[in-house]
Image (cartoon, rainbow, N blue to C red):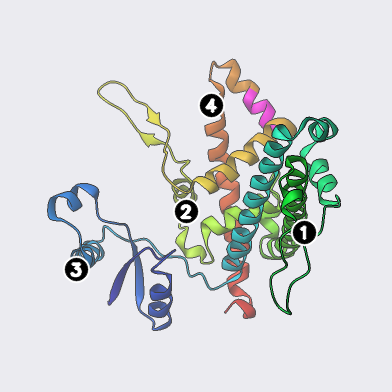
Amino acid sequence: MLAVGVEGTGSYGAGLARSLSAAQVVVVEVDRPDRSTRRRVGKDDELDAISAARAVAAGTASGIPKTRTGAVEAIRALRVARAGAIKARTAALNQLKDLRLCAPEPLRARLTDLSLPVLARTVAAWRVPPPGAPSRAGARPSARPVQTLADPGTATRIAMRAIGRRVAELNTEVAALDTDLYALVTTTAPALIALFGAGVDIAGQLLVTAGDNPDRLHSEAALARLLGIAPIPASSGSTTRHRLHRGGDRAGNCAVHRIVIVRLRHDQRTRDFTAARTAQGKPKPMIIRSLKRYVVREVYHALITDLTTLTSMPSAA
C-alpha cells in the first residue's frame, strides 16, 4: 500500500494533503522530528523527508489528517475571523481606557464613570473638527489645522472618536459572524449542542478540534488524549499514581473545562458527585479532572453521531 507522510497537514501541508487524498493516496500525519535527533543529525528538507518516510514505514506515525473539506472547516474559518475581530475589539477598548486615563482633566472627569462599552458608544457620537477638503478628485483629504491638532483635548477627542467608531464596526462584524456560526453549528451538531453546558461557541470549538472525518476518533480514549484530558501514568516502585496530561488541543481542553464549570453551578448530578468526592477528601482540581473525563465520554458519542450524520448526507459527499 502506498502511503505518504505529510508534516503540518493543518497548515503549510494542507494543500498537499488535499491533493494526495483527491488522488486516492493514503496520507499519514507526521510529527516534526524529535529535537534531540535534529541536534544530532541536523535539519534540512531532505532529512525531514527521510524522517517522515521512516516514521510511516515503521508505523510510528499513524495519525489520520483532517479532511478540511466539509462544514467543520467552514466553522473553523468563521471562528478564525470572529476571534480576530474580538481580539481587535479588546485592543481598541483597552486603548480607549488608556486615553481616558491620560486625557485632560475636564475631559477625563466627564468620562470617568462610564463603562467601556458605554464609553465607546459615547465617543463614537462626538463631533470633532472635520478635515479639510481634498485639493483634487481622488486625493487624500488635507489635515486639520495645526493649531487645532496641537490642542491635547481636541486631539484626544479625535483619537477617541476614531477608536469608538472602530469598536462599533467590530461589534457589527462579530454580531454578523455570530449569526452565521449559530446557523451553521446548530445544523451541523444538534446532538453536541443538546449536551448540558455546551453552547454554540463550545460546540464549534469541539467540532474544529475533532475535524470533519469521524474515523480519526476511534474511541473516547483517543478523544480524551486529543483534548489533553487522558491521565498519564507516573508510577515508580511501590507508588502508583497518574499525572495531568499537558499536551493535546488546549482550546478543546478549555471548551470541556467550561462545560464542567457550568455543570458545577447548575447541574444537580455534577454537584452531588462533587459533594461525594469532597467528602472522601479529594481536592477540587482532581474532582474537576475526573468530571472532564466523564464529559469527554458524552462529547465523544455526540460528536460521532453528528459527524456520521454529516458525512452520510448527499451534500457532504
Residue 291 screen position, x and y as percent: 58, 35
Residue found 56% across the figure and 52% down from its top: 300
Label 3, secondary structure: give it.
Answer: helix
Residue 70 screen position, x and y as percent: 57, 72
User: Of callouts 4 and 3, which one flags the residue occurring earlier in the amino acid sequence?
Assistant: 3
Q: Which of the 4 image quadrants contains residue 102? A: top right
The reply to whether residue 50 is visible in this rendering is: yes
As measured in the structure, the alpha-carbon distance from the residue carrying label 2 to the one carrying label 1 is 41 Å
Report the amino acid beneath label 2.
Ser
As measured in the structure, the alpha-carbon distance from the residue carrying label 3 to the one carrying label 1 is 48 Å
Q: Which residue is mark 3?
A: 46
Q: Which residue is mark 4?
A: 285
| Eye-nearest disc, 2 or 1 | 1
The reply to whether residue 295 is visible in this rendering is: no
Residue 66 screen position, x and y as percent: 47, 65
Q: Main secondary structure of the magenta part?
A: helix
User: Of callouts 3 and 2, which one flags the residue occurring earlier in the amino acid sequence?
Assistant: 3
Q: Which residue is mark 1?
A: 172
User: Of callouts 1 and 4, which one flags the residue occurring earlier in the amino acid sequence?
Assistant: 1
Mark 4 burial class by Cα count in 10 Å: few <14, some 14-19, many 20+: few
Q: Which residue is mark 2?
A: 219
As measured in the structure, the alpha-carbon distance from the residue carrying label 1 to the one carrying label 4 is 39 Å
Instruction: For the residues labelled 4 and 2, say whether their Cβ atoms are less than 8 Å apart.
Output: no
| Eye-nearest disc, 1 or 4 | 1
- Magenta span includes 7: no
